[in-house]
Image (spheres, rainbow, N blue to C red):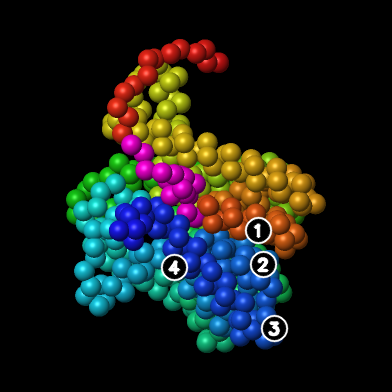
């Protein structure tokens, strides 16, 4: 009886929280093994844990260089964690179950519905099948194109390994890279700032990983049905606006900065501006020195990272749809109207409340974490805020603070990465008791606002 009660209390949010925690612990143990490092020594527990959390949350923040510290075994463990984290362990488990023709139970379908951010359970298994196909297709094409480009700089076997690793990492918006092997620790994509092929491939992978599979499916079906869902319209519109506005702002703010865009030609400046505007979707890779950006540009990236990617994607943040609903609510209030309307569709009051709740919880979490880190870490507040938002948005961009974090700071950032991937609202649902339906309503009261 007690076992049955425990099973009934295991809601989808609780299951997802426990599942991500379990995979993180397994990843930590594997990365702690001496075989996981290039020199055969055991990695410190805090560093192994930090790396495992960063990988499973598809963030990309690193306290040790991915290309030089970890062995092939360790890098493959990280890559598996990235793939599991980007697509969800329940999605991966469902693929295995389907391969063995095992029936997917109703409870498992409910967990998949929560993991994929869907509002209905119908067709969820078919959705998972399509996710597998398109994931392998996109990552495969990205790996092939990157291999062809890298083969001009390194032997073909190494180019193929780099191509596969970077394609999976970038599409899942993780941001890990192996360039420390050839350009020195923590070198990243900076050496390819003027390379149009690398830039276009990486930007395309980040964009596709950030808009989510639902939107990708809608775009593929569009030539047949000539129709996009409201979700896809909102995601594509807001994402495109944020990318264009971000690129223009970065170009204006950085065009004469000698540490970033200043020495580059104008075509490369434009390309680098768009790259930096796309990567805060949660990509985590950069062709510019983040620490060398103007403070105004760094704060702009903080805002973009906080908004993040789309629901059902491999990215983090409060999500572009949440941002759209909030902006819609503000416009509705200014116009003196009752309903939030997007593309001639009324948004339910429950969705507006959910968006406000998610945003407030995220802000409170970031404010608290940033204040705490300002006490434990010796860095300026903007750098601390940037690191905290990057961790929560599972972006992976850094101004250089990650490698200098104290033990307490590493644990704090790791928690932010975990919460950012799981979602503060999902965690709140997981920790809360089941709400009973209210049998009465209180009388309406009035307070003065503004």
Q: Is residue 72 visible?
A: yes
Mark 4 or 2, closer to the camera:
2
In which quadrant of the rendered image does the C terminus lie? Answer: top right
**Is 86 displayed left or right of 450 in the figure?**
left
Do callouts 3 and 1 mark residues in contact (Cβ within 8 Å)? no
Task: Tell me the CA gap for discs 4 and 3.
Answer: 26 Å
- Above or below, 163 relative to 310: below
Q: Secondary structure at mark 2?
A: helix
In the drawing, what numbered circle is on residue 41? 3
**Labels 4 and 3: the sequence-earlier one:** 3
430 is within the stretch colored magenta: yes
User: How far is disc 2 from disc 3 in space, using C-alphas?
Assistant: 15 Å
Q: Which circle, 4 or 3, is nearer the viewer? A: 3
Residue 356 versus residue 267 in the image, above or below: above
Q: CA distance from mark 4 to mark 2?
A: 21 Å
Q: Toward the viewer: 349 or 390?
A: 349
Where are the magenta residues, as a range? 421-436
Instruction: Tell me the CA gap for discs 2 and 1.
Output: 8 Å
Image position of 249 with respect to 336: above or below: below
Q: Residues within 10 Å of mark 3 (few under 14, many from 20)?
A: few
Label number found at residue 84: 4
Q: Which residue is mark 2?
A: 46
Of helix, strand and loop, which one carries label 4? helix
Is 181 in front, or is 351?
351
Q: Secondary structure at mark 1?
A: helix
Q: Nearer the viewer, residue 229 or 306?
A: 306
Mark 2 or 3, nearer chain start: 3
Q: Which residue is mark 1?
A: 411
Pointer 1: residues within 10 angstroms few (<14), some, or many (20+)?
Answer: some
Distance Cα–Cα, label 4 vs label 1: 22 Å
- Residue at 76 percent across and 47 percent down: it is 375
Residue that appears at 65% across and 54% down: 412
């Amino acid at each position: 009886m007690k076992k049955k009660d425990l099973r009934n209390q295991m809601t989808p949010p609780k299951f997802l929280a426990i599942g991500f925690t379990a995979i993180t612990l397994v990843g930590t143990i594997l990365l702690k093994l001496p075989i996981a490092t290039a020199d055969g020594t055991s990695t410190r527990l805090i560093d192994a844990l930090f790396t495992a959390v960063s990988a499973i949350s598809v963030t990309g923040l690193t306290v040790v260089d991915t290309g030089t510290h970890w062995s092939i075994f360790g890098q493959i463990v990280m890559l598996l964690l990235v793939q599991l984290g980007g697509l969800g362990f329940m999605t991966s488990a469902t693929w295995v179950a389907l391969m063995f023709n095992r029936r997917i139970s109703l409870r498992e379908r409910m967990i998949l519905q929560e993991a994929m951010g869907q509002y209905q359970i119908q067709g969820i298994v078919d959705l998972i099948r399509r996710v597998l196909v398109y994931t392998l297709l996109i990552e495969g094409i990205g790996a092939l194109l990157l291999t062809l480009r890298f083969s001009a700089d390194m032997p073909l076997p190494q180019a193929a390994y780099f191509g596969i690793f970077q394609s999976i990492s970038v599409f899942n918006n993780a941001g890990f890279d192996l360039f420390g092997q050839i350009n020195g620790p923590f070198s990243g994509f900076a050496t390819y700032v003027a390379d149009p092929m690398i830039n276009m491939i990486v930007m395309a992978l980040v964009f596709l990983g950030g808009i989510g599979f639902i939107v990708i499916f809608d775009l593929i079906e569009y030539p047949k049905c000539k129709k996009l869902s409201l979700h896809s319209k909102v995601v594509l519109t807001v994402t495109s606006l944020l990318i264009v506005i971000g690129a223009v702002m970065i170009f204006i703010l950085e065009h004469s900065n000698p540490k970033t865009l200043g020495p580059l030609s104008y075509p490369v400046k434009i390309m680098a501006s768009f790259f930096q505007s796309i990567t805060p979707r949660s990509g985590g890779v950069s062709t510019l020195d983040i620490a060398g950006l103007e403070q105004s540009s760094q704060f702009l990236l903080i805002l973009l990272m906080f908004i993040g990617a789309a629901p059902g994607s491999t990215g983090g943040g409060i999500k572009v749809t949440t941002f759209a609903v909030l902006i819609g609510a503000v416009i509705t209030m200014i116009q003196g109207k009752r309903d939030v309307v997007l593309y001639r569709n009324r948004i339910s009051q429950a969705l507006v409340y959910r968006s406000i709740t998610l945003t407030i919880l995220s802000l409170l979490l970031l404010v608290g974490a940033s204040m705490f880190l300002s006490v434990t870490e010796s860095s300026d507040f903007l750098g601390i805020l940037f690191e905290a938002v990057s961790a929560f948005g599972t972006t992976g961009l850094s101004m250089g603070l990650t490698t200098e974090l104290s033990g307490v700071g590493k644990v704090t950032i790791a928690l932010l990465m975990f919460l950012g991937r799981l979602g503060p609202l999902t965690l709140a649902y997981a920790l809360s008791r089941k709400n009973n339906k209210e049998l009465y309503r209180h009388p309406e009261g009035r307070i003065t606002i503004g």
